[in-house]
Each structure stands twice: as C-alpha cells, then as structure tokens.
Image (cartoon, rainbow, N blue to C red):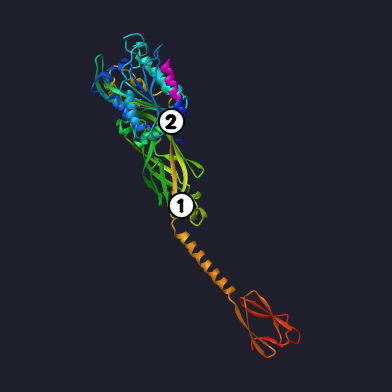
C-alpha cells in the first residue's frame, strides 16, 4: 500500500512541478520475470539506455516520474514509483541512473515465483493516476511479453493492449522503437526491447512531435519510429518538385515542414501546374490502395485541386511517387504593389496563410514484411505484430499541409512615394519660408517716398505727415495693395 501512495504522490508532483510550456513525463520500466536477462546479464545496456533516454527527452522544468511495473497483486501494487522530480539541465540522467541501480526483477508476494506482466494496467495507471488525465508523455520500456497471471494466451493479451492503444480516447499518438539488445540471463535470454511513447492529449502529441522533429530521441535511439496511432491523419506529405506555366511563382519546403509559395507581385497567372512527390508518412505501413482528392484554402477561398492521378497503390514509406496537379492561386486577392499593405511589407514579404488538404478514401494499409521479420527476430514467438494491424475502422485519412503564400514587394514603389513625399515637404518648406519672409513695399505719401516692410497676410496703417491715417497696406504672397484709401489723400504704391 505504501508503494501505491508513493505512486499517487507522483501525481502531486506532476500537477504542481510543471510550469507553462513544460511537459510531464512518466517512464515505466518493466521488471517482471520475463525481464530477468536484462537485469542479470553483466553486459546488459538496459538501465543505461533508460537513463540516457530520460536525459534526452525530459527538458529542464518538465516533471518526471520514473516507475517500475510488472503486475499488481495484493501486497505488491504496480506500478511503483522510483523517482519523482522536476528536471534540471544537469542531473536528470544521473538521478534516473541512481534510481535504477538497485532495481531488480520482482517476485510475487510471499513466493519465489517471478512476477508476471500487465502492459495495459501499467499504461492506464500512468495516464489516470500519475498524469491524472492531464496531457503528457508516457514512455514504456518492455520486452513485449504481456502475460498477466502467467497467461500463455499472449495473443489475446496483446489484443487487449491493442484496444487500449487504438480505442483509448486519452491517447492521441503512439510510436514504438524496436531495439536490438541481445542478453543472456540465468533463466531466460532475449534479443531485443521495445520502447513505446504514448502521447496523452493534444498537448502531449505536440510535445512528442517536437521531440521527434528535434531529433532529441535520435541521440539515444537511432531506429526509425514505428507509428501505431493515429492512422487516419498526417498519413502522407507532399514535397514540391516543379512548378510549370506560372511565371513568378516558386514552391519550396518551409522550415516548419509546411509549404511556401513565393510569388512575384506582378504575377497574375490564376493557375499553376505543380508536380509533387507524394510520400508515405506512416512507417511501417504500406498504403496498398487509396483514392486521392485534394483542395486548397487560401485567402479565404476553398478550391478543388485537380490531380493528374486520383489513385495510389503500393505506396511504401521512403519511396515517393510523382503526382501532378493544377492549383488555383489567389492572385486576385493579392494587394497591389501601390497599396498600403504592400508598402508596409516593402523589403520583406506579405504573407497569406492557408492550407492544402489531401484526403485518402478507401484506404487500405498493410504492415511491411520487412518490419514483421524484424519483429520476429527481436521477439521470437511473440505475436506482437498483431498490435500493428490497422483497425478495420480506419478506411480513410486526411493530411493537412500548411502553406503560406509570400508576396515579395520591392522597395521601388516605397522609394518613389518617399521621393514624392520629400519633394512635397521641400515645396512646403519653401512656401513656409516665402510666407514668413518680410516683403518690402515702397509707398509715396504726399510726395514723400516711404519704405515699408510686412509679412504676407498682414495689413498695416499708413499715416500722412500730420499723423492721420489715410490708407492701409495689405501684403500677400503675390504683392501689395492699398485699402481704405481716404478721399483726397495723396497716397500711391511706388514713386
């Protein structure tokens, strides 16, 4: 019971230790009787592998629970937490290694018999208890011998595990890494291990995808991950090969894995013929047959993409096939190069986000023979490949490929507008100077020539020799004029 309390306490750590952006991890390490050679063989690299994996995938700030599992029995609960911690930059691997140092194969309570195994029980406990149903990643390190109560009907037990993987609503993604690790123990021998990664929730799936893309897992495990779930999305990808009949348009792979269309601002071709390489992204499955259809969603418009071939057959992972298409481009929605949007993007790019959706109907998948043979060599006598059998309900899939249309506006229009603005400013400055500069006027009053100075827009009085106002002088940008001339007064402009 104390061990169960320790495992429940790990939930508290996962609830409070992970900050924003952190990912909780639960690493389950099998220590049932079938694992005996991995513990007793002095050449076994089993424990160092777990420590290295933890050090690679658990990031600083992530919560980590390390637990051993076999099969829960009265007096011997399973899983049993070995370590609960908030990861830092330096000690994760060493602390995991220290926690595993004394771990050995478990025995049944009050018996010398080695403990049995229940894979499904361990994974469910990790999801419901350690993670508390919250997002995270559960790692399962096992020799694939699923035999609760020493049940020899391993195929049936594997089917139960299969149901948990494919029908467990909390599990969003599952990948597996079959590893060659020959060991010889006192009672048994083994050829390999399996490391599963269960992504719980959408956030857990994104975190697992990030680990795969960053190749952090590949620092420790060089095997290609085998996908177990999902088999109905992100099943294929399109890699642009050539763009035809669309001057000023070029497609390329974006850094985030999506697609990028670089468009010249003068390009006005409404359709582009694009040749792709269609790749199967579902190792270790071959798409034996499927019907293809596609559409684009760009600039708020959804349009059908015409495909040169709407059928695909025997598409194996790593062996792309060419696929022609005709795609409409949102040229009518692109800002004119004299628009404010274009001016704001001058020297960089105006970006229109969108997506390409590829749908595979009547999809049939088949596990590759090479993978089956590898599994048989690593786990002889184990019918585990049944777990990799695609569910009968998965007969269609979708692949959504992000695409961004980038229009590159040059500096010419902005420079031209800048020149015009500068000229207008210069003219305004000249006008201001001219307006503010005093003007000289010569006025003759009673045969006396006077010189008067005034700024444009002003009016000043004119007095005779006796000091009586006889007129007013109004000054403008264009000259002077006399106003309110008194009757009989001898006043004129000039001499």
- Residue 457, horizontal then vertical, whole percent: 64, 74
For marks 2 and 1 on the same chain, the one whose residue lies earlier in the sequence: 2
Q: From the image, which quarter does the N terminus lie in?
A: top left
The stretch in magenta equals 1-11
In the picture shown, does residue 116 fall above or below 82?
Answer: above
Q: Give me the residue at 62% from left, 75% from top.
A: 456
Name the mark on residue 204: 2
Q: Residue furthest right?
A: 487
| Res. 65 in view | no
Residue closest to the eye, 396 or 140: 140
Residue density around tag 2, few if under 14, some if 14–19, many if 20 or more, within 10 Å:
many
Q: Position of residue 432 (x, y in %)?
A: 57, 71
Label 1 environment density (alpha carbons within 10 Å; few <14, some 14–19, many ≥20): some
Quadrant of the image occupied by residue 376? top left
Residue 9 counted in the magenta span = yes
Q: Is residue 384 above or below residue 86?
A: above
| Residue at 24 percent of width and 15 percent of height | 186
Determine whether 483 is above or below 426 in the image: below
Q: Nearer the viewer, residue 281 or 488?
A: 488
Q: Residue at x 72, y 85 (%)?
A: 467
Tell me residue 125's x, y (percent). Answer: 43, 20
Q: Is residue 17 left or right of residue 178?
A: right
Quick check: is 434 in the magenta stretch?
no
Q: The residue tagged with tag 2: helix, strand or loop?
A: helix
Q: Quadrant of residue 173?
A: top left
Q: Quadrant of residue 400?
A: top left
The secondary structure that most of the magenta stretch takes on is helix
Q: Mark 1 sits on what residue?
A: 268
Q: Mark 2 and 1 residues: CB-CB less than 8 Å, in contact?
A: no
Secondary structure type for disc 1: loop
């Amino acid at each position: 019971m104390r061990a169960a309390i320790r495992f429940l306490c790990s939930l508290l750590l996962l609830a409070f230790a992970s900050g924003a952006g952190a990912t909780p991890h639960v690493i389950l390490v099998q220590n049932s009787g079938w694992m005996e050679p991995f513990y007793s063989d002095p050449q076994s690299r089993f424990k160092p592998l777990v420590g290295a994996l933890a050090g690679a995938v658990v990031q600083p700030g992530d919560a980590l629970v390390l637990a051993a599992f076999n099969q829960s029995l009265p007096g011997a609960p399973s899983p049993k937490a070995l370590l609960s911690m908030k990861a830092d930059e330096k000690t994760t691997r060493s602390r995991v290694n220290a926690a595993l140092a004394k771990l050995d194969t478990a025995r049944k309570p009050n018996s010398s018999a080695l403990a049995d195994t229940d894979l499904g029980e361990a994974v469910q406990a990790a999801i419901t208890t350690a993670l508390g149903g919250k997002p995270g990643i559960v790692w399962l390190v096992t020799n694939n011998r699923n035999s609760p109560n020493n049940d020899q009907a391993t195929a049936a037990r594997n089917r139960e595990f299969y149901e948990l993987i494919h029908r467990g609503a909390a599990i969003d993604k599952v990948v597996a890494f079959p590893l060659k690790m020959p060991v010889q123990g006192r009672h048994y021998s083994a050829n390999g291990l399996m490391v599963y990664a269960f992504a719980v929730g959408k956030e857990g799936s994104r975190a697992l995808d990030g680990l795969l893309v960053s190749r952090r897992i590949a620092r420790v495990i060089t095997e290609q991950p085998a996908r177990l779930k999902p088999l109905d999305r992100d099943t294929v990808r399109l890699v642009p090969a050539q763009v035809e009949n669309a001057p000023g348009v070029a497609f390329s792979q974006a850094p985030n894995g999506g697609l990028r269309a670089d468009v010249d601002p003068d390009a006005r071709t409404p359709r582009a013929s694009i040749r792709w390489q269609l790749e199967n992204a579902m190792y270790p499955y071959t798409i034996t047959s499927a019907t293809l259809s596609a559409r684009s969603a760009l600039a708020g418009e959804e349009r059908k993409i015409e495909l040169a071939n709407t059928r695909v057959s025997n598409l194996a992972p790593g062996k792309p096939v060419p696929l022609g298409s005709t795609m409409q481009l949102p040229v009518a929605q692109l800002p004119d190069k004299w628009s404010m949007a274009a001016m704001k993007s001058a020297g960089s790019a105006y970006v229109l986000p969108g997506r390409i959706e590829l749908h595979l109907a009547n999809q049939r998948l088949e596990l590759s023979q090479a993978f089956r043979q590898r599994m048989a060599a690593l786990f002889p006598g184990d019918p585990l490949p049944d777990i990799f059998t695609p569910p009968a309900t998965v007969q269609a899939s979708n692949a959504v490929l992000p695409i961004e249309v980038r229009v590159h506006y040059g500096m010419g229009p902005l420079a031209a507008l800048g020149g015009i603005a500068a000229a207008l400013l210069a003219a305004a400055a000249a006008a201001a100077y001219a307006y503010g500069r005093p003007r000289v006027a010569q006025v003759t009053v009673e045969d006396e020539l006077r010189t008067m100075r005034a700024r444009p827009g002003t009016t000043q009085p004119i007095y005779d020799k006796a000091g009586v106002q006889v007129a007013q002088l109004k000054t403008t940008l264009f000259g002077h004029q006399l106003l309110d001339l008194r009757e009989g007064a001898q006043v004129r402009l000039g001499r």
